[in-house]
Amino acid sequence: MKILILGGFLGSGKTSVVIQLAKYILGSNPENKTKVVILENEIGEVSIDDKLLRGSGYEVANMFSGCVCCTMAGELVIGLHNIIRDFNPELIIMEATGVAYPDNIRETIEQSLPDADCSITCITDAKRWKRLFRPMEMLLKGQLDAADVILINKTDLVDGDTLDEVEASIRTFNDMAQYFRISAAEPIDTVVFEAVLGIEQRSFK
Amino acid sequence: MMKSDQIKQHEHDESCACGCHDEHHDEHQHHESEPHHHEHQPITITTHDMSIVGSYTFNIEKNYKESETILDDLLKQAAKEVTDLGGIIGHIKAFLKSEGESCMISITDDESNKRYVKESRCTVEGVAIVFCIEPEQLQDILENVFKEYISE
């Protein structure tokens, strides 16, 4: 079983990517529905994103009022075991809160499910990167430095030079990951999803 | 990483890693992951690490279309007030829900009589996650912006 941790700062476009990723995996065959379970974690006392995802018809589990990278780590383990028991999915997409450190989540999962194939994809917001970079530096660094794949989102909202500067800046935190530039407002190239899912190890720009 | 039931306070100065260094934060005590529950039920404020999290629920006594416009304006106003205080917006989002149209069907003989009712109430559930302002400031902003609706 594969567990994909989807991290990234608030508003970077994680849920938009999740919706397209689930659609890509499930295709048009409703029998595939339980192959993928989306586990949503939201920090607020009301949940928002799971309502959007449930409306899309996917199998969604939700944990809110805390962050599974720290305060709800115990609940994450229980939640994952329940999902495996109830659905036995091939893939769990764990959408982290926008303030989570994905590496902490991976550590928790690997301790509890040592056989799970766990990877981290981190989404960044090209439009807001320069504005957030300095005040949120510690958090952004902590979110990005363990990512296997980094998606630079909202590329349609910045010009090419800005995009190059943003990518160079992001690479100072993690130059080992595979990088892709996307706009989740439009259909995402399947090559991106293959990389996110570890189907094919190649990079493009 | 801090647990939410732990309280860590430190002097906030230029070497602080919390990321909030504009002048109006120079002297405040910074609380990490401090539960900051208020008694106002429509709006609750919590803190997590560096973030201030405001959760809110209320109704708008209008149809869906009007409510959508109203909510859009309210969230933009909240965002502006956070930014005006030097805060950084993580996100401010809300889910707007309406039952839409309702229908009562009655039959006395073999003909049915239908009466349609257009739903004139929408429910809002939302979260505002911001940085670099005080929890009390976010509470005040949300109370002020949503005051017309949380008092109904």
Image (cartoon, coloured by chain):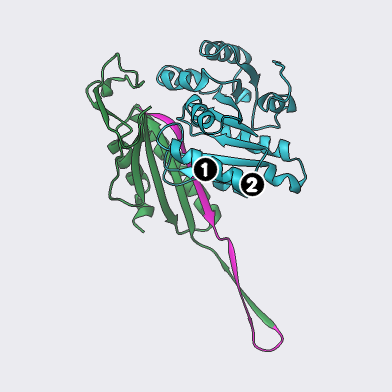
Residue visible at 36% across and 20% down in the picture: B19
State the SS at label 2: helix
The residue singled out by tag 1 in the image is: A79
Provide residue A142's location: percent of width, then percent of height. Answer: 46, 20
Q: Is residue A87 magenta?
A: no
Q: Which residues are magenta?
A: B87-111
* B24 vs B62: above or below: above
Would residue B94 be counted in the magenta stretch? yes
Residue B79 lies, with reference to residue B120, above or below; the image says above
Q: Quadrant of the C terminus of chain A?
A: top right
**Chain of the residue displaying label 1:** A
Q: CA distance from mark 2 to mark 1?
A: 12 Å
Where residue A162 appears, as percent x and y from the top left, is 57, 14
Residue A204 in which image quadrant? top right
Up the image or down, A6 lies above or below B115; here it is: above
Amino acid type shown at disc 2 = Phe
B47 or A5: nearer the viewer: A5
| Chain painted in green in the figure | B
* Callout 2 and callout 1 share a chain: yes
Q: Say which of B69 and A39 sits in front.
A: A39
- Residue hosting label 2: A87
- Identity of the residue drawn at 50% across and 27% down: A107
Q: Secondary structure of the magenta portion, mostly?
A: strand
Instruction: Write the residue at 36% across / 59% down.
Output: B152
